[in-house]
Image (spheres, rainbow, N blue to C red):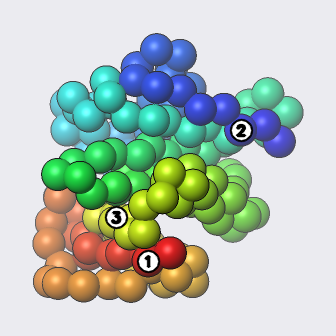
Amino acid sequence: MDIKWFKGIRNSEDAFAIRNEVFVKEQHVPVEEELDDQDKVCDHLVIYLLGEPVATGRIIIENKKYYLGRVAVLKKYRGKGFGKILVNELLNKIFLQGEKEVFIHAQVSAEGFYKKLGFKPYGEKFFEAGIEHINMCIIN
């Protein structure tokens, strides 16, 4: 397994390919909503298994708060620990910079996954790209 970081959109084709498969094809999120201006300034992470990209996520800084976003694992690799590795790598990068809180707009279907990793839900559920979400936060 290899883990690679990318800044902005340079070299992030594999991240976009995973996101296209998961969000656009599986979840029917319009591509114009899935790709956004945040991609140009985010840190992107891709996990590779035997050279194949299998999972991705990004770090967004908005209003001096750190958010995880576009966390995705290809369907055939789900349930094998890649999501946990991915989220922990993203969190480690943020916490090593001295940040204490990290937020995520989690899909409600993934709320249990994030709770197991230490995230706590807050606020009301809401819809984003036609999918129900919940705000969650983890404190280091």
Amino acid residing under circle 1 = Ile
Upstream in sequence: badge 3 or badge 2:
2
Q: Assess whether mark 3 and mark 1 are in contact (beta carbons under 8 angstroms).
A: no
Q: Could you tell me residue 72's position as x and y percent? A: 50, 50
Does residue 139 appear to the left or right of 116 in the view shown?
left
Provide the residue designation for mark 2. 3
Tell which residue pokes out farthest to the front in this image.
Answer: 98
Where 124 falls versus 103 (above or below)?
A: below
Q: Secondary structure at mark 3?
A: strand
At x 34% / y 64%, what residue is drawn?
A: 104
Where 66 falls versus 116 (above or below)?
A: above
Q: Could you tell me residue 114's position as x and y percent? A: 49, 75
Amino acid residing under circle 2 = Ile
Quarter of the rendering containing residue 60:
top left
Q: Which mark is residue 139?
A: 1
Q: Which mark is residue 104?
A: 3
Q: Could you tell me residue 132's position as x and y percent? A: 23, 70
